[in-house]
Image (cartoon, helix red, strand yellow):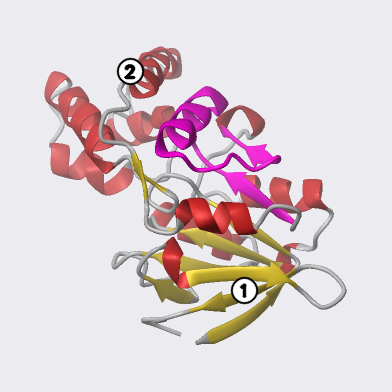
């Protein structure tokens, strides 16, 4: 077991708490075929990143207004297509245990999409959520995590992030935070666990959170 002391826990959503892999990959594969882009290239960059930013990387000569419009349509589809969206093991229990402790959701999804996915997966929505509407730069930029820390009144270095994607892990590290990676692709994180079920939380001594990691695969 690994014991960690933190001022706050900042959690990503997709791939960290909620498994939306199937719908995300299906919609982005369809988008790729429609635009003559190799789906493998698309899927290598979209996870953790806002849609319009992914489109700008994949089609750099397109007007930004078109990326914004297509991303709005994509978000509407994602919000409506919830079949197969489920909680990752232990996610609901972790969020329930965090009630009353300093924590926040930090996601590249919009607020309506986050609420829809968390709701259908049965995972409690944290009182504080930093979503796509709240930032000017998406992951791998650290803005979202830094904003969440500021809103909680916790120094960035005292925060711990939970993330699954390369972009999200890079954002947490760039914010000066330690990162609990979730899943086999999270090798760049400070620690790696298989699922939220391996993360237990309790009130810290005086303030903050005591985090215990079971079955850490990397330290």
Q: Does the magenta stretch include residue 188?
A: no
Which residue is pictured at 64% across the width and 51% down the height?
Answer: 145
Q: In this view, does 157 lie above or below 86?
A: below
Residue 117: x and y in percent read 43, 33
Quadrant in the picture for residue 38 = top left
Which residue is label 2 attached to?
A: 77
**Viewer-side residue, 99 vs 218:** 99
Does the rendering let one see residue 89?
yes
Does the rendering let one see residue 171?
no
Which residue is pictured at 15% across the width and 37% down the height?
Answer: 39
Residue 182: x and y in percent read 40, 64
Left or right: where 51 falls relative to 11: left
**Viewer-side residue, 175 vs 214:** 214
**Viewer-side residue, 64 vs 29:** 29
SS for dot 1: strand
**Viewer-side residue, 101 vs 33:** 101
Q: In this view, does 79 lie above or below 37?
A: above
- Mark 1–mark 2 Cα distance, whole angstroms, equals 36 Å
Which residue is pictured at 65% across the width and 57% down the height?
Answer: 98
Q: Which residue lies furthest to the right in this view?
A: 206
Residue 49: x and y in percent read 43, 41
Which residue is label 1 attached to?
A: 211
Q: Is residue 46 above or below residue 10?
A: above
Q: Does the magenta stretch include residue 130?
A: yes
SS for dot 2: helix
The magenta segment is 102-131
The disc placed on residue 126 is none
């Amino acid at each position: 077991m690994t014991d960690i002391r933190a001022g706050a826990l900042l959690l990503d959503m997709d791939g960290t708490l909620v498994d939306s892999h199937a719908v995300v990959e299906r919609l982005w594969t369809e988008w790729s075929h429609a635009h003559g882009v190799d789906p493998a290239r698309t899927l290598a960059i979209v996870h953790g990143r806002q849609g319009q930013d992914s489109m700008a990387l994949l089609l750099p000569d397109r007007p930004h207004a078109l990326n914004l419009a297509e991303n709005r349509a994509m978000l509407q589809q994602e919000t409506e297509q919830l079949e197969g969206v489920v909680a990752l093991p232990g996610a609901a229990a972790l969020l329930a245990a965090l009630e009353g402790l300093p924590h926040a959701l930090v996601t590249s999804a919009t607020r309506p999409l986050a609420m829809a996915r968390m709701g259908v997966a049965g995972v409690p929505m944290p009182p504080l959520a930093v979503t796509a509407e709240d930032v000017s730069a998406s992951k791998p930029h650290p803005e979202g995590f830094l904003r969440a820390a500021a809103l909680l009144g916790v120094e960035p270095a005292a925060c711990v992030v939970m993330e699954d994607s390369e972009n999200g892990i890079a954002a947490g590290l760039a914010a000066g935070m330690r990162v609990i990676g979730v899943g086999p692709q999270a090798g760049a994180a400070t620690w790696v666990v298989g699922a939220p079920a391996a993360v237990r939380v309790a009130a810290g001594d005086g303030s903050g959170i005591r985090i215990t990691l079971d079955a850490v695969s990397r330290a």
